[in-house]
Every structure is written in C-alpha cells, then in structure tokens.
C-alpha cells in the first residue's frame, strides 16, 4: 500500500451484507482512503453479492460445500484473493470458521466483527445468550483474527442497553447500527498505519489496547 493511493479491501460475507455496505459507503464518502477490490461469499444466495454487484464491485462466490475440507476451502479463498489488490481483509458476517491456511497469509491484516462484548459469547446466537443471561447491556466487538475462534485481540467495542421488552431481533437491530460505525473506524485506523497486530496484542499509535478493545464513544477519531 502506497501512501496516498487508495488501499484495496477484500470483504467476505455470507448474508445480507449491511456491514459490507457500510464499507462501500465509507469509501465513496472518502471516509476511508480505500476501494473494495472484491466481495467474496461462501453462500451463493447471499443478498450482499447482489448489492456489491450493483455498486460495480467484483464479486466471487466460493461455495464451501464444493470442498472436501475446511483447509481446501480456505486454500481456494486465498487463491481467489491473490487475484486482487488486497491490503486488508474484512470479515463482514462471514459465517465460516477459518483455518490457519487462510488466517496465516493474512495475519495482521484480517479483521472481524462479532456481535457481542467479547470475550463474552463467542460463536453463535449472541443476542439470545445475552438476553438469557439477563445482561443489562450488549454490544459488538471489532477484533483482529487469529486461529482462536472470536478470540483475536479486540480493537473497538460498542455497547448498547438491553431493554426489558427486547427480543434477539430488536437487540440485533440496535447493535447493527453500532457495527456500521465502529467497523469502518477500526479499518481507517489500520489503513492510516495507526492500528497494528503485534506479538503483545493490538496497538493503536504504539499503545497496547485494553483486553476488550477501546470503548467506542462519539467523536472518537
Ligand atoms: C452482523 O451482526 C455481524 O456482526 C455478524 O453477522 C451479522 C452480519 O450482518 N457476524 C457474526 O456473527 C460473525 N460470527 P450483515 O451481513 O448485515 O453485515
């Protein structure tokens, strides 16, 4: 990545792609000095593929069901991304567990967003689990990806209140609004060279980040 030149993003999705759309919008507004090089889905029916194509972005579908193992699928993903200029890989609702075959070549330039206040609730059904536990707040975490599922160093975390009348759907709707804010912000920090994955953890401007990432607040820049 050369200073001044737009960086290349690869966005991996499995579904609707609202986080992907937040990145497309952030690029077109100039909030991110980047362009989306390719959107890849493991799911041929992902609505996000259509949204990306409509925005004139290259789309690829690599159906995990066509591969005998996770490793074979991951190798196909790496080969696909190798065809595009990729400075940063954004997992945006990508619902496949990745192996080191994919994670290692992109280590340090691979971000994920997970809809819980990690380290709480890695895995699936995060909103229902927060409700079942009676948590007063829920939220979302952007983190670097390492081979440990949802276990890589957190970068940014946004919290929302849990309301008495919430169900998983209403809570998800409140959380996703925060996702669209904090994910492009974390990516911007990365593209500006401020955010790094180091041996000791995630750092911003050389400072080690707290174990749950930076708490998001308005005006954070
Ligand atoms: C988002 O809530 C994202 O945090 C979550 O999937 C949703 C995708 O929505 N990701 C995970 O659960 C990853 N384990 P989107 O397709 O509208 O961006």
Image: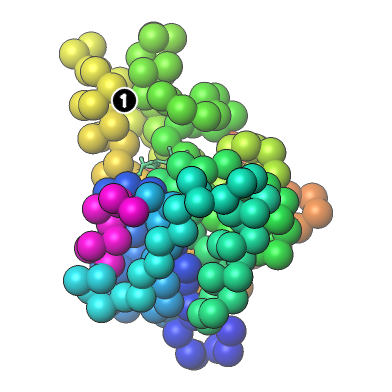
Q: Using the image, determine if residue 84 lies above or below residue 126.
A: below
Q: Magenta residues? A: 44-52
The residue at the point 23 percent across, 62 percent down is 50
Residue 128 relative to residue 193: left or right: left
Q: Any magenta on residue 49?
A: yes
Residue at 40%, 67% in the rendered image: 60
**Which image quarter: residue 56?**
bottom left
- Looking at the image, which residue sits at the far right? 199
- What residue is shown with label 1? 161
Tell me: 190 left or right of 216: right
| Along the line of sight, the residue nearer the viewer: 185 or 61 | 61
The answer to whether residue 73 is visible is yes
- Name the quarter where the C terminus is drawn: bottom left
Q: Position of residue 159 (x, y in %)?
A: 39, 34
Q: Nearer the viewer, residue 156 or 27?
A: 27
Q: Quadrant of the N terminus?
A: bottom right
The reply to whether residue 216 is visible in this rendering is no
């Amino acid at each position: 990545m050369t200073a001044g030149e737009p960086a290349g993003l690869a966005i991996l999705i499995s579904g609707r792609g609202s986080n992907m759309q937040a990145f497309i919008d952030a690029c077109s507004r100039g909030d991110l000095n980047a362009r989306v090089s390719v959107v890849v889905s493991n799911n041929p029916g992902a609505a996000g593929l259509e949204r990306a194509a409509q925005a004139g972005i290259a789309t690829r579908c690599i159906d995990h069901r066509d591969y005998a193992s996770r490793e074979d699928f991951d190798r196909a993903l790496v080969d696909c991304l190798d065809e595009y200029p990729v400075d940063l890989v954004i997992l945006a609702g990508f619902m496949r567990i990745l192996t080191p075959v994919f994670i290692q070549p992109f280590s340090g330039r691979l971000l994920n967003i997970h809809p819980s206040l990690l380290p709480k609730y890695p895995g699936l059904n995060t909103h229902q689990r927060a409700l079942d536990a009676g948590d007063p707040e829920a939220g979302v975490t952007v983190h670097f990806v390492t081979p440990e599922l949802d276990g890589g160093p957190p970068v940014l975390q946004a919290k929302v209140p849990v309301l008495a009348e919430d169900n998983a759907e209403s809570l998800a709707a409140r959380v996703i609004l925060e996702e669209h804010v904090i994910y492009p912000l974390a990516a911007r920090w990365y593209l500006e060279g401020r955010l790094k994955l180091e041996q000791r953890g995630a750092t911003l401007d050389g400072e080690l980040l707290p174990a749950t990432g930076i708490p998001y607040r308005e005006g954070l820049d």
